[in-house]
Image (spheres, grey):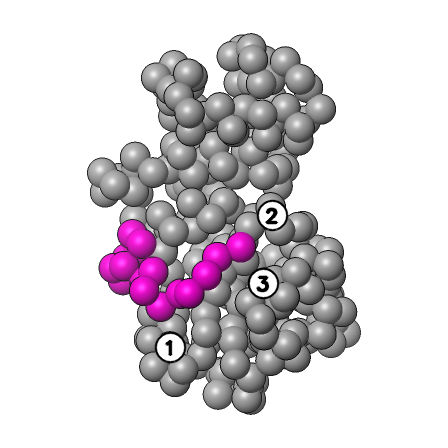
Amino acid sequence: MINFSGRAILLDVEGTTSAVAYVYDVMFPFASRGLTAYLDANWGSPALAGVREQVANDTEVPAAATDRDTFEQEITRLMDSDVKATGLKQLQGLIWEAGFKSGELVAHVFNDVPPALERWHNAGLDLRVYSSGSIHAQKLFFGHTTAGNLLPQFSGHYDTQIGGKRESESYQRIAQDWKVKPEDILFLSDVVAELDAAREAGMQTGLCMRPGNADVEPGHGHQELVSFDEIS
C-alpha cells in the first residue's frame, strides 16, 4: 500500500491508467492510417499551421513548415521511430479527434481507474494528467473512455510543452503552475526514469506494474503498485 496524505495526484496515461497495447496497437495505427487523408483535407487550416511550425522546429527541417511532402515524410519518420516530439503529438491529437467523436475510437482504462478517480476527487484531492500526448489528445482520451467521460475528475493537464518527462525541471514547473508543494504531489507512472525525475523535484512517486508493461530492474527505490486500490 501507498499511504498518501498530500493534496494532489499527477497521472501518466499509457501503462498507468490505460494499457500500453491500446495506445500502440489501436491509437498509433489509427493516426498512421489517417495521416495522408488528414493532410489532404486540412493542409491550409489554422489548426495545422501551428503544428507545421512545431514539426519544423522539432526536426530542424524548415521545409516541413511549408512543403506538404516534406512535412509528411518527417511525420512518418517520427511515427516510425516513436519520437516523443511535441509537433507529432499535436498532429496525432488532431487525427484522433475524428475517431473519438465518431465512436471508432473508445479509450481503454483499467477497471480500477474510474472508481479510484471518483474516490480521490470526492476526498478533495486535485487530479491532473502529465503525458507525452498533447493536452488536446488527453482530453479526447479521457472524454471518450470505456467507462464514459472521466474528464470532470481532472482539474488540469500537462504535455511536453512544459518540458520532457525525464527532466526534473518539468516537474518543478508543474508544481509551480499547480501552486502545490512538490512533496504534496504523488506522481504515478510506469517509467522509472520519469519517476526518478519527479522524485528529484521533490514529489512522491509510485511505479505502476500494469499487465503488458515493460519489465523494470530491481532497486529503483519507488513504491510499486498493480492497482490504484493500493493507494490509501
Residue 146 part of the magenta-drawn span: yes
Task: Mark 2 or mark 3: name the one nearer the start of the chain.
Answer: 2
Report, in whole angstroms, how far the alpha carbon at label 2 lies from the one at label 3: 14 Å
Residue type marked 1:
His
What residue is shown at x 51% (from left), y 73% (from top)?
Answer: 9
Q: Which residue is mark 3?
A: 177
Q: Which residue is mark 2?
A: 160
**Residue range corresponding to the magenta coloring:** 143-158
Please determine whether, in this image, residue 33 is positioned above or below residue 63: below
Please determine whether, in this image, residue 161 is positioned above or below residue 205: above
- Residue 58 in the image, given as x and y percentages of width and height: 66, 31
Q: To which quarter of the image does residue 86 belong?
A: top right
CA neighbours of label 2 inside 10 A, class few (<14), some (14 to 19), many (20+):
some
Asked if residue 188 can be seen in this view, the reply is no
- Residue 185 in the image, given as x and y percentages of width and height: 59, 75
Q: To which quarter of the image does residue 170 belong?
A: bottom right
Q: Quadrant of the N terminus?
A: bottom right
Compare residues 90 and 205 and report the one nearer the observer.
90
